[in-house]
Image (cartoon, rainbow, N blue to C red):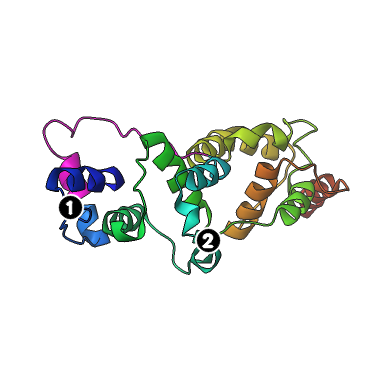
Amino acid sequence: MWNCRQQMAAASGRAEPACARLKPGEIADLRIYLENLPQTRRKDPDYVLRPAAEGRASFSAAGCARCHSGRAAPERRKDRLCPSAAAASLWNHPDAVLPVRQPVGRDEMSAISSYLWSLDGHGDSSKGARLAARRCAGCHGVSAPPLQSTAGETAAIPLLAALWNHGPEMQSALSRGHARWPFLSGRDMANLLAWLEEGAPLAPGRAGTQDVARQRRSR
């Protein structure tokens, strides 16, 4: 939708083509319509979220940061953009404020979208390191792979797959050790992800082992 505006401008001979403004709900309706056309309804989705750092670099390379900085920086937004709202925002973006509407490729837009969506709930890496040492290190790095080995799986889709696939094996290990499943809040997970993305070492101490032992005694 970003690139389409430039093509429409070239076809119409106007710098700012006359385009209807679209609301997020209308974008969602259009997407559902397009996904159910005979030629598209059997196609599998082809979209992968990318690491936020890659998206931040693409955001700058595309020239977005020239205007969207300071008070207008994405980090300062109070609301977060769902996919339909992001598409509507790009479609309605006025060309008059852009010296050049630079085309953006599919992979670049995927990375930029990943960066924007990652801003919601970004965690504290130091708290993540302490949480990993207290709740995870009793197994990871002892009888299970170190958590740092999952650093490449912190993009949204690979992360969800890794967490889902890890469940049965982790449950079996906890059952053998008579330990409870560690509950993590959304904030806990955000902090862990921030720590994993940063690649920092565990916080000092081996409280994780103590946590597991405490859980066993409480059963």
Of residues 15 and 73, the one nearer the viewer is: 15
- In terms of secondary structure, where does tag 1 sit? loop
Of residues 193 and 95, the one nearer the viewer is: 95
Which quadrant of the figure has residue 24? Answer: bottom left
Query: The residue under label 2 is which amino acid type?
Result: Ser
Residue that numbered label 1 is attached to: 14
Query: Which residue is pictured at 24% across the width and 53% down the height?
Result: 28
Residue that numbered label 2 is attached to: 69
Expressed as whole percent of the image width and height from the top left, the position of residue 52 reads: 54, 45
- Residues in magenta? 30-50
Classify residue 138 as left or right of residue 191. Answer: right
Residue 39 in magenta? yes
Of residues 110 and 31, the one nearer the viewer is: 110
Query: Which residue is pictured at 20% across the width and 48% down the height?
Result: 9
For the residues marked 1 and 2, what is the alpha-carbon distance in whole angstroms?
Answer: 29 Å
Query: Which residue is pictured at 31% across the width and 52% down the height?
Result: 87
Residue 36's place in the image compared with 15, above or below, is: above
N-term-proximal mark, 1 vs 2: 1
Query: The residue under label 1 is which amino acid type?
Result: Arg
